[in-house]
Image (cartoon, grey):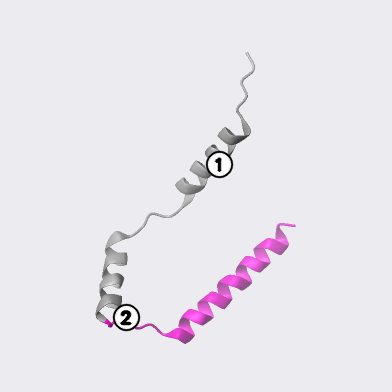
Amino acid sequence: MDVSISGKAAEVQQAQAAVKALPETRVELVTAIQEEVDSGRYQRDSKKIAKRMVNEALRESLRNKRGR
């Protein structure tokens, strides 16, 4: 017996696998940050954030180049 699935079913399976691969949401952390934002106390070091963003973009770029 040969079993095949439709293209739509394959897409659903891929989407489910992608969702399972996502990290769990840390509800406590999200709640704490939301409270800081709501009260006007949320402050982060913008230079540190920018540096992390650039570093992550560079890492991603290198991963993409190696994968080709």
Query: Can you give x and y, in whole percent of width and height, for residue 13 in the image?
Result: 53, 37
**Quick one: 49 or 31, which is closer to the camera?**
31
Query: Can you give x and y, in whole percent of width and height, for residue 45 in the image?
Result: 41, 85
The amino acid pointed to by label 2 is Tyr
Query: Can you give x and y, in whole percent of width and height, for residue 46 in the image?
Result: 45, 85
User: As drawn, is 50 to the left or to the right of 6?
Assistant: left
User: As drawn, is 15 to the left or to the right of 24?
Assistant: right
- Reply above or below: 8 against 47: above
- The tag earlier along the polypeptide, 2 or 1, is 1
The C terminus sits in image quarter = bottom right
In the image, what residue occupies the spot 66% across and 68% down? 61
Q: Which mark is residue 14?
A: 1
Q: What segment is highlighted magenta in the picture?
A: 40-68
**Quick one: 20 or 13, which is closer to the camera?**
13
- Residue indicated by mark 2: 42
In the image, what residue occupies the spot 47% across and 79% down? 49
